[in-house]
Amino acid sequence: MSEHAADPATEVLVVHRNLLCTAAYEILGSAADAEDVLQDTRLRWVKLDLAHLREQRAYLRRGVIVGDREYA
């Protein structure tokens, strides 16, 4: 079985997933809602041109915090 390389956007999300999930959970207090916010953030993230982002982690964290407002 061969391993498939993930696209760059997915790789960045995997690296920061724990941070993002923790931030969403601390705001919402629900693991299910935190996962929903991460999914919404992922859907927005994969549409971006990553070459134009200097601070990818900060952009993702901001996206989670803004997304949390929709669920709070």
Image (cartoon, rainbow, N blue to C red):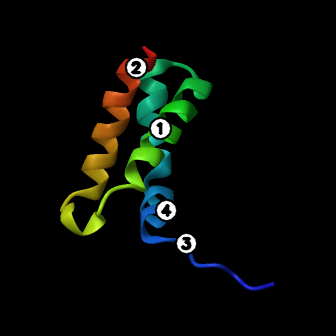
19 relative to 29 in the view: left or right: left
Q: Residue at x 44, y 31 (%)?
A: 24
**Depth order, front residue of 7/32:** 7
Marks 3 and 4 close (CB-CB < 8 Å): yes
Residue to which mark 1 is pinned: 40
The residue at the far front in this view is: 47
Pick the quarter of the image with the C terminus.
Answer: top left
Gap in Å between the C-alphas at discs 2 and 3? 29 Å
> Regarding mark 4 in the picture, which secondary structure is present there?
helix
Q: Mark 1 is on which residue type?
A: Asp
Mark before the other along the chain sequence, 1 or 4: 4
Q: Mark 2 is on which residue type?
A: Glu
Q: Mark 4 is on which residue type?
A: Thr
Q: Mark 3 is on which residue type?
A: Ala
Question: Image height check: is 61 above or below 67?
Answer: below
Mark 1 nearby-residue class (10 Å; few <14, some 14–19, many ≥20):
some
Gap in Å between the C-alphas at discs 3 and 1? 19 Å
Mark before the other along the chain sequence, 3 or 1: 3
Q: Residue at x 51, y 19 (%)?
A: 29
Mark 3 nearby-residue class (10 Å; few <14, some 14–19, many ≥20):
few
Residue to which mark 4 is pinned: 10
Residue to which mark 2 is pinned: 70
Marks 2 and 3 close (CB-CB < 8 Å): no
> Regarding mark 2 in the picture, which secondary structure is present there?
helix
Marks 3 and 1 close (CB-CB < 8 Å): no
**Depth order, front residue of 14/70:** 70
Residue 6's mark?
3
Residue 26's mark?
none
Residue 31 horizontal/vertical position (percent): 59, 27
Marks 1 and 2 close (CB-CB < 8 Å): yes
